[in-house]
Image (cartoon, grey):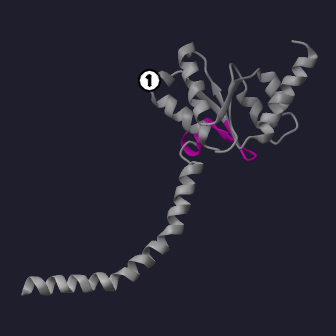
């Protein structure tokens, strides 16, 4: 590969790391083409960008960042990188779900990056993958905001409802 092409690829990789919220480094050694295609499809559905990159180019792209000293240890062998741009846990959740299926037995997590922090393989699979996603957090926030209003409406309806129960009991008694 020519020097200009390498520089361009390093710039593209660096741009992905600059705009990401999280990244997961994967070892796909031993996976069939069919399984790799399924994995890429799952990543696309989740809004995750996946690319196989040369380790030396990734090291060059991350040379002047906070990740540089940690990532070097993880970049050995074949490396695929899954970048999440909106939901930090999206890539980790896809990997965990894919590994749970019989088809993902060859896929292994090398490491992960999130908000300036380096995560080892166990942290990616056990912590990052179990974090609530963006939509789950929105639903939780919405439920929290609606709860007081629902209780207020129930409180306003209680006297009328109790009066109806009283009339019903009186009718049954007679």
Where is mark 1, residue-wise?
102
Q: Is residue 174 magenta?
A: no
Q: Residue 32: in sight, yes or no?
A: no
- In the figure, residue 31 lies in which quadrant? top right
Please, what secondary structure does the residue beneath circle 1 have? helix
- The x and y percentages for residue 161 are 29, 81
In the figure, 151 relative to 77: above or below?
below
Q: In this view of the protein, which residue sits in the foreground, 82 or 158?
A: 158
- In the figure, residue 51 lies in which quadrant? top right
Relative to residue 127, is residue 2 drawn left or right? right
Report the span colored magenta: 112-128
- The x and y percentages for residue 8 are 88, 24
At 52% from the left edge and 59% from the top edge, which residue is drawn? 140
| Label 1 crowd (10 A; few <14 / some 14-19 / many >=20) | few
Relative to residue 115, is residue 7 drawn left or right? right
- The x and y percentages for residue 142 are 54, 62
Of the 4 image quadrants, the one containing the C terminus is bottom left
In the figure, 87 relative to 80: above or below?
below
At 61% from the left edge and 43% from the top edge, which residue is drawn? 89
- In the figure, residue 91 lies in which quadrant? top right
At 50% from the left edge and 68% from the top edge, which residue is drawn? 146
Of the 4 image quadrants, the one containing the N terminus is top right
Q: In this view of the protein, which residue sits in the foreground, 8 or 47?
A: 47
At 27% from the left edge and 84% from the top edge, which residue is drawn? 162
Q: Residue 100: in sight, yes or no?
A: yes
Marks counted in the figure total: 1
- The x and y percentages for residue 30 are 57, 15
Q: Is residue 123 magenta?
A: yes
Q: Residue reaching furthest left?
A: 174
């Amino acid at each position: 590969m020519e020097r200009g092409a390498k520089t361009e690829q390093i710039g593209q990789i660096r741009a992905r790391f600059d705009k990401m919220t999280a990244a997961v480094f994967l070892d796909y050694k031993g996976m069939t083409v069919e399984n790799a295609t399924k994995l890429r499809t799952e990543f696309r559905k989740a809004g995750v960008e996946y690319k196989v990159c040369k380790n030396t180019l990734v090291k060059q792209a991350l040379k002047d960042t906070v990740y540089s000293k940690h990532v070097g240890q993880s970049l050995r062998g074949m490396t695929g990188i899954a970048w999440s741009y909106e939901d930090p846990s999206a890539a980790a959740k896809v990997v965990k779900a894919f590994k749970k299926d019989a088809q993902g037995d060859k896929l292994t997590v090398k490491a992960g990056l999130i908000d300036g922090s380096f995560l080892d393989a166990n942290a990616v699979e056990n912590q990052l993958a179990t974090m609530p996603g963006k939509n789950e957090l929105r639903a939780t926030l919405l439920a929290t905001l609606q709860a007081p209003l629902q209780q207020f409406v129930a409180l306003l309806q209680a006297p009328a409802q109790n009066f109806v129960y009283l009339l019903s009991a009186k009718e049954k008694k007679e």
